[in-house]
Structure formats: C-alpha cells, structure tokens
Amino acid sequence: MIAIVAQMRLLVAVDPVDFRRGIDGLAAVCRQRLEADPMSGALFVFGSRSRKSIKILCYDGQGFMLFQKRLSQGKFDWWPEGGGQAVRMLQARELQLLLWNGDPSCGAGAPLWRPLPAGE
C-alpha cells in the first residue's frame, strides 16, 4: 500500500515507456530521459503506449517498489502533455484523480495553502 500525501514529489513521464521494463529499466529511464535521481524519494509515474496501464516507481530508503494499475476496460483518458519537456510535476490530488481515471486538469479543489495577511 502506498499513501499519497501532499508533501510528496510526484513526477510523470510525459512520453510512454515500454512496460516490459522492470524496476531497473524504469530507474534507468528516470536517470537518462527524466534527468532525475530514482533514489530521491519521489514517485515516478509512467504510462504505457496504449494508456491502459500506469506504473509508479518509488524508493523508500531500503529498496524500490513498483506499483501497476491496469484498467479492465478502456484506457486512461488524460495524460499530461510535456510542451517539450520529458517530465511534468503533479500534485497528490491530481495523481489520485489520475489513478481513478479522472481528469486532473478539470478537477477543482481547494488551494493547498493560502497566505495570511500580516498581523493575523
């Protein structure tokens, strides 16, 4: 089980990856294509070409964990566009929407924080 909390760093690979890759292959993708350290504690989210599956790679300080969700019908409707970048950051609530096959770009939610005026 993985708890997705607001303080986590969540990185989504914009381009699809070969889902025959395991932990080592996805860690290499993190280093080479995403230019990120897979042992940084961030969650790395990957999508398959067909958009029927998502894999999440994370390192917990002792070892790697790999999670996969494959839809029984249809495909994931939303996937981020990179605009020339290989990786996109997500917020925890956006990842939760994505895992439920929702559209994080349309999901409205309360702001994560709001600044307090001086003197309060």
Image: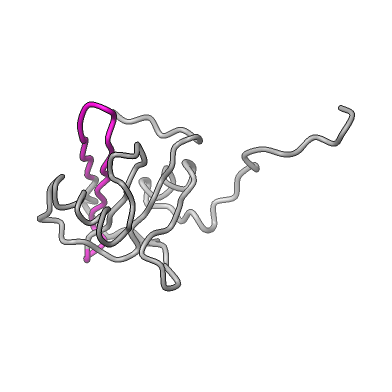
Query: For this rendering, which residue is in front, 90 or 42?
Result: 42
In the rendered view, would you say 2 is above or below 68? above
Residue drawn at the location 89% of the way across and 29% of the way down: 119
Query: For this rendering, which residue is in front, 94 or 73?
Result: 94
x and y percentages locating residue 4 in the rendered image: 41, 34
Left or right side of 18 for 92: right
In the orientation shown, which residue stands out farthest toward the left? 20
x and y percentages locating residue 12 in the rendered image: 36, 54
In the rendered view, would you say 113 is above or below 14? above
**Which quadrant holds residue 39?**
top left
Residue 61 within the segment the image draws in magenta: yes
Residue drawn at the location 24% of the way across and 51% of the way down: 71
If the image is split into quadrants, where does the N terminus sit?
Answer: top left
x and y percentages locating residue 41 in the rendered image: 35, 36
Residue drawn at the location 38% of the way across and 30% of the way down: 3
If the image is split into quadrants, where does the C terminus sit?
Answer: top right
In the rendered view, would you say 54 is above or below 3? below
Residue drawn at the location 64% of the way across and 42% of the way down: 110
Is the magenta region chiefly helix, strand or loop? strand
Left or right side of 37 for 109: right
x and y percentages locating residue 46 in the rendered image: 28, 54
**Which quadrant holds residue 115?**
top right
Residue 62 within the segment the image draws in magenta: yes
Magenta segment, which residues? Answer: 49-68
